[in-house]
Image: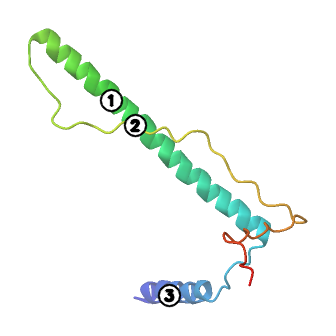
């Protein structure tokens, strides 16, 4: 019983200490690096989905080929969408610090003369 009480007090104390820790402060470079890592992870997921799509297409083509040689008439139930290649990962370069902001677009209609 004493052991249980001691363990529960230790766990409660460590949980309260962990709850009081401040949020980490990230500078702009760390935020940019985190965003890039997030974008790389998302792109890796797209590449994985593309590779899975290609492998499923190869498996289906192989199945239909072997089914045709055995004399079975098998047709696909649905037309599968084409696999979309995500292309290489491209991280947009941050704008230069000294660069001027883009000029606003000129007005479409010129001012009328009175």
Furthest residue toward left: 72
**Could you tell me residue 20's position as x and y percent?**
63, 89
Q: For label 2, count other residues whose C-alpha is less than 10 Å away and answer few (under 14), some (14-19) or many (20+).
A: few
Residue 80 place in picture, x, y as percent: 28, 37
> What distance separates the C-alpha of mark 1 from that of mark 3?
59 Å
> Would you identify the image quadrant in which residue 67 lies?
top left
State which tag comes first along the sequence, 1 or 2. Answer: 1
Question: Depth-wise, is mark 1 or mark 2 nearer the camera?
Answer: 2
* Disc 3 + disc 2, Cβ < 8 Å: no
- Seen in the picture, residue 4 relative to 98 is either above or below; the reply is below
Q: Residue at x 74, y 74 (%)?
A: 26
Give the SS element for disc 3.
helix
Residue 63: name its quadrant: top left
Tell me the mark number nearer the camera, choosing from 1 and 3.
Answer: 1
Q: Which residue is mark 1?
A: 57
Question: Residue tagged by mark 2?
Answer: 83
How crowded is the residue under tag 1: few (<14 C-alpha within 10 Å), some, or many (20+)? some
Q: 114 or 95: which is nearer to us?
A: 114
* C-alpha separation, residue under disc 1 versus residue under disc 2: 9 Å
Q: Residue at x 62, y 87 (%)?
A: 17
The residue positioned 45% from the left and 90% from the top of the image is 5
Q: Residue beneath label 3, please?
A: 6
Asked whether the beta carbons under mark 1 and mark 2 sit within 8 Å of each other, the answer is yes
Viewer-nearest residue: 114 or 81: 114
Q: Position of residue 3 (x, y in %)?
A: 46, 84
């Amino acid at each position: 019983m004493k052991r249980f009480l001691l363990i529960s007090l230790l766990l409660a104390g460590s949980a309260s200490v962990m709850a009081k820790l401040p949020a980490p402060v990230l500078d702009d470079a760390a935020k940019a690096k985190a965003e890039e890592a997030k974008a790389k992870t998302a792109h890796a997921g797209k590449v994985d989905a593309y590779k899975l799509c290609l492998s499923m297409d190869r498996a289906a083509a192989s199945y239909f080929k072997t089914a045709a040689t055995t004399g079975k008439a098998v047709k696909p139930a649905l037309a599968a969408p084409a696999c979309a290649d995500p292309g290489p990962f491209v991280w947009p370069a941050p704008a230069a610090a000294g660069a001027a902001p883009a000029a606003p677009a000129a007005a479409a209609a010129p001012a009328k003369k009175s």
